[in-house]
Amino acid sequence: MLDALAHTLRSIPGRPAVLGTTRTGAVRTRATCGELADLADRYAVALHARGVERGATVGVAVRPGPRALAVMLAAHRLGVRVAVLDPGAGPDVLRARLALARPDLVLADAAAQAVAGWARPLARRVRLALPDLGELGGPVATVGRRLPGSAPALEAGARTRSLSGGGRGAGLASGALGLPRPVDEDGDAVIVFTSGTTSLPRAVVHTRSSLAAGMATVTDLVRPEPGRPVLGGTFFVLVPSLASGAPVALPARSPRVLARQMRRLSPQATYLTPPHLRAALAENARFTGRVWTGSAPASAGLLTRVKEAGADEAWGVYALTELFPAAAVEQADKAAFASDGDLVGAPLPGVEAKTGPAGQLLLSGPAVRDRYLGEAADPWVDTGDRARLENGRIVLEGRCKDMVLRRAENIYPGLYEPALHVAGVELALLVGVPAGDGDERLVAVVQPRRGADRARVRAALAAPLERMGGARPDALLFADIPLSGRSLKPDRAATAALAAVRLTAERAGGRGR
């Protein structure tokens, strides 16, 4: 699929590829097809010149957009493995992940390096809490515009065509650039971190073939038409759409601007997470074409609201980091489902589904991840969800694994709970409390030691909470954590129920947190 994308970009160099928007919702071109292809070639040359070759690992902390996609295209050409680094994970988690992936080079934009001096207040406002990438032992290069304190640019001394200016993407002379030949065989393509702990992080490894299979499934599912815009910002939206000749518009961050953007754009297909859909609906957004949503549960009610707001079809997509996508269901089928559980649809072509002894859902297929980093290959993925197969369709019955879904982000408490055990804390858990329509609030429930000064404990927790970045809890509660079983382990379900009662009581009493 990435090879097909590179060919398409060169065949229509003057067409818009990646679109942005102004505050009024007006469409602007962030990169033409030719500019995107040129940038990918330049990055490939720059990486090759730095000695980054087939089998190497490159860490990438670059915001979604043309540059991030160009990095992926360059890495694919070279047969390089990309480790996706999330700036919002917090410095301790990021250090552990870097230690596991051991990248030969880290590529970061200026925002991801905003960690010290004048930039610290900016980083804190956007919930970036990073270690100084330059202190991690490996080389760091800046992708895009450099700011004071940024690492040297990836393209040392090379002139780069502006993504917003002038050129029609006539193409670059490969011989003049010293463009290396593309790698044409399977191998590791990307590392995506999921669960684990700070000391024992866990990461999914996808191969070039599993990525290609997943993107082919998306193409068959969405059926993007050439020339008509698609709205969405994920890698699995960008690549299949662009490879089909459809420009992709990155969704505006502001719900109000997003609603204006959709009105101006009239996209043929839209992919937004459930929280983004709810925010857009609150701004009276009008939908067109087919709408897809995933990354968090999407209720029949939410899909119905999307269709009532103009969409021809509204689809919920069941997907995992280990397998994207796995199943899909349209609003009409989901609304008509009257049994217990959450219908997520029939397995997509090539996906095999079965349930294990404890009722856990197991999936396999061409698009499944090859392995977890440092572990043996395994053709089956344990989703961590309890499910049943009913008339060939997957019906979820709850989650087996300990995970909190907040605003379409998977938050694994085990990553962050150890940091909450500061002086004066006996026990600490992070639990999810239902917040409506499948979303959850993340609550830190802390049990102080007997006789501890709660004001001092709260003060001691300030720094660890700050370092949690995008996983920072919505609320902090002091309470005795329920225990269960012969070993008297902390009972997460009971703790979540306790937190829900306490938050409801505090809201009723007007005391807030």
Image: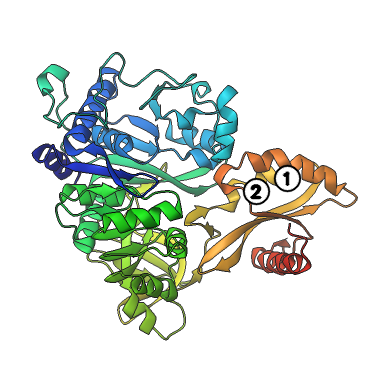
**Is disc 1 placed on a helix, strand or loop?**
loop
Marks 1 and 2, how far apart at CA: 7 Å
Please report the residue visible at 32 percent of the width from the left and 68 percent of the height from the top.
315
Numbered disc 2: secondary structure:
helix
What colour-coding does the image apply?
A: rainbow
In the image: residue 463, left or right of residue 157? right
* Residue 428 or residue 250, whichever sits in front: 250
Q: Residue at x 34, y 53 (%)?
A: 261
Tell me where residue 443 appears, x and y as whole percent. 66, 57
- Give the residue at x 50% y 71%: 398
Identity of the amino acid at label 1? His
Residue marked by disc 1:
421
Q: Residues within 10 Å of mark 2 (few under 14, many from 20)?
A: some
Specify the farthest residue to the right: 451
Relative height, residue 295 to residue 7 (above, below): below
In the image: residue 469, left or right of residue 327: right
- The reply to whether callout 1 and callout 2 are in contact (CB within 8 Å) is yes
* Residue 377 drawn at (x, y percent): 34, 49
Q: Label for residue 417? A: 2
Identify the image quadrant of residue 85.
Answer: top left
Q: Residues within 10 Å of mark 1 (few under 14, many from 20)?
A: many
